[in-house]
Amino acid sequence: MAVLAVVGASPGWAQAQQASEVRPLADAADSGDGLPPDWSITGEGSARKLVWQSDERVPMGDARVEFYAGDRLLGRPAPGKDGRTFRLGPDGVPLDSVKDLQVRAAGRRLDAPEAGSGGGGRSAVTAPRQLPANQVDPGRPGAYRTVTGEYDLAPVRLPGFAEPVEMRAVVVAPKGADGRRPLALFLHGHHFTCYTPQGEIGGDWPCAAGYKPVPSHRGYLRDQRLLASQGYVTVPVSANGINGQDWSAEDGGAQARSSLVRQHLARWAGWSAHPGTAPAAVRQAPRADLSRVLLVGHSRGGEGVNRAAMDSLYAPPANQTGITARCAGTSAAPCSSARRSSARTRSRTCPR
C-alpha cells in the first residue's frame, strides 16, 4: 500500500479559563490543609489522591493535563466527569511534601496566569509575500457527481483500553467513476465525546444515559465532496472511543489511533477483494485502490495517521497483536508482509 499522511495542527494546550492565581504554600495556611486554593488531598493510605478543581470546565484539547511540583512532573491526573476535577493517585507522588503545585497542558499554566502573558494576547504576525497561483487549482470541484452513505460496524477492542472502540465512518465517493479509485481516510482530533440536546457535553466513553456520541467524523463533508468530485473515495472515521480513554495512555493514544486506522483499511482491503461483503455505503462507491491511500489527520489524529503510515510497513509487536494472521475477508499472505518496488512501497496491512 502506498500511503501519504497529511497532518493538521491545532494549538497544543488545553484551552481552559484561567482560575484564581495560586498563592504560595506559606500563605495558604488559612485553607486548613496547607494546600493552595483549589487543591486538596482526599482518601487514606493507598486511596489517597491529589485533587485540583478548576473554576471553569477544562475543554478537551490535544494536550493532556499534567500536575507539577515546581519543574518536576508528578503525573497525569484522571479527569472527572464534571470536566473541572482532576485526581492523581499516590504512586510516585509524595503527597505530604508537594510544594509549588502547578497544572499545565503543553507547558502552559491552567491554574494561574502566566508571568508576562499580558492577558494572553499574541504579537502581530507579518504575512508572507503571496506566491503566484498554481496552474492547477486543487480547490476546484471535479467532473464527478458524488454519493454519500455511512457504515457502523461492530466495535473493536484495542490494547490498553477497557471499553471497545466504535467502527463508524461516513463515505462520500464519486458517482459512476470507472475503475478502482484512490482512497482518502480522515481522522479527527481530540474533542469532547458526548453531548445532550440541551447542549451539555462530556468526555466519557461509552456515553452516559441521555447523551449521544459527538459525530466528529462528519466534520469533513465539504472536503469529502470536493475530493470525491475529483475521483477520490473518502472516508472519515470516528474515534470517540479513543478520545474518551486515552488520558491514561503513555503516548496519548497515538498507537490506538494507528490501530483504528488500520482496522478500517483492513476492512476496505477485504471489501475491495469481495465487494458483496461490503456495507451498502461502500457498495455504492467505486472499488477502492489500496495501493493509493491518502491519510489525513487533524491534531492527535495527525499523530495517529503518521503512526499508521509507519506501522503499515512492519509487523506489530508481539504483545500488541490480538489479530489473525491474515487480513479479514481475504486469502492473502500474512498481513504484515511488505515488498518494495522502485515506484512505490506496497504492504498488506492489518490493524494492531
Image: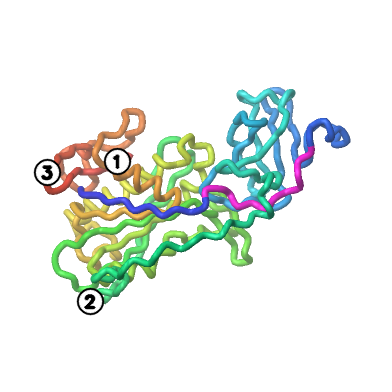
| Mark 2 secondary-structure assignment | loop
The part of the image, by quadrant, that contains residue 178 is bottom left
Q: Position of residue 231 (x, y in %)?
A: 22, 68
Disc number for residue 96: none
Task: Report the residue at 32% width, 44% height from top.
Answer: 308
Disc number for residue 341: 3
Q: Is residue 219 magenta?
A: no
In this rendering, is residue 317 above or below 65? above
Q: Position of residue 269 (x, y in %)?
A: 22, 51
- Read off the residue under disc 2: 143
Q: Callout 2: few (<14), some (14-19), or many (20+) C-alpha neighbours within 10 Å?
A: few
| Mark 3 secondary-structure assignment | loop
Q: Are marks 1 and 3 in contact (CB under 8 Å)?
A: no
The mark nearer the N terminus, 1 or 3, is 1
Residue nearest the observer in this picture, 31 or 288: 31
Query: What amino acid is found at the position of numbered circle 1 in the picture?
Result: Met
- Read off the residue under disc 1: 310
Residue 272 seen in the figure: yes
Q: Callout 3: few (<14), some (14-19), or many (20+) C-alpha neighbours within 10 Å?
A: few
Q: Position of residue 223 (x, y in %)?
A: 36, 67
In this rendering, is residue 207 above or below 93? below
Q: Which residues are magenta?
A: 12-23
Query: What amino acid is found at the position of numbered circle 2 in the picture?
Result: Ala
Q: Position of residue 14 (x, y in %)?
A: 58, 49
Task: Report the residue at 42% width, 60% height from top.
Answer: 217
Q: CA distance from mark 2 to mark 3?
A: 32 Å
